[in-house]
Image (spheres, grey):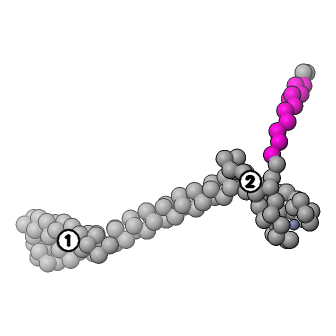
């Protein structure tokens, strides 16, 4: 992190020095004056630039989190405990044998998943 900051400061200083030199040759202002103005402008620019980048990154992260939560929720099942009949929210993963411990009575349950098929009804107008 610190070498990155030093690198940024060095780059900004070199750019300011170049602008200061060109400004000094082209105008009647002193090198230091143009150098400092150029430094300030660059710091302000990068401050806003970084703010926008971090804002966009934050929005993207929040969007990804929402997507992840949605994905988790699509695989959740509200199911009764076999012992106490109270409902539990259980994550279903078809690649494992799905078992859960009841939140209420702590009984270990296995989930038996069965599939049925039905033909979709088509409505003709
Ligand atoms: Zn239970």
Q: Is residue 101 visible?
A: yes
Whole-angstrom CA distance, mark 2 to mark 1, is 57 Å
User: Which image quadrant is residue 82 in?
Assistant: bottom right
The tag on residue 10 is: 1
Of labels 2 and 1, earlier in sequence is: 1
Badge 2 marks a residue whose secondary structure is loop
Viewed as shown, does residue 97 lie left or right of 67?
right
Q: Residue pushed farthest top?
A: 124
Q: Quadrant of ligand 1?
A: bottom right
> Is 120 inside the magenta-drawn segment?
yes
- Identify the secondary structure beneath mark 1: helix
Nearest to the observer: residue 108 or residue 61: 108
Q: Which residues are magenta?
A: 113-123
> Which residue is nearer to you in this view: 20 or 82?
82
Image quadrant containing the N terminus: bottom left
Based on the displayed image, in which of its 4 quarters is residue 122 positioned?
top right
Residue 98's tag is: 2
């Amino acid at each position: 992190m610190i070498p990155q900051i030093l690198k940024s400061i060095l780059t900004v200083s070199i750019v300011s020095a170049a602008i200061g030199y060109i400004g000094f040759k082209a105008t009647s202002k002193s090198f230091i004056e143009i150098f400092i103005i150029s430094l300030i402008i660059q710091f302000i620019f990068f401050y806003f630039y970084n703010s926008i980048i971090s804002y966009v990154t934050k929005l993207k992260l929040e969007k990804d989190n929402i997507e992840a939560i949605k994905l988790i929720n699509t695989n959740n099942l509200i199911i009764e405990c076999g012992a106490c009949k109270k409902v539990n929210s259980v994550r279903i993963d078809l690649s494992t044998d799905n078992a859960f411990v009841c939140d209420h009575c702590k009984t270990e349950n296995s989930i038996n998943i069965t599939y049925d098929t039905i033909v979709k009804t088509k409505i003709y107008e």
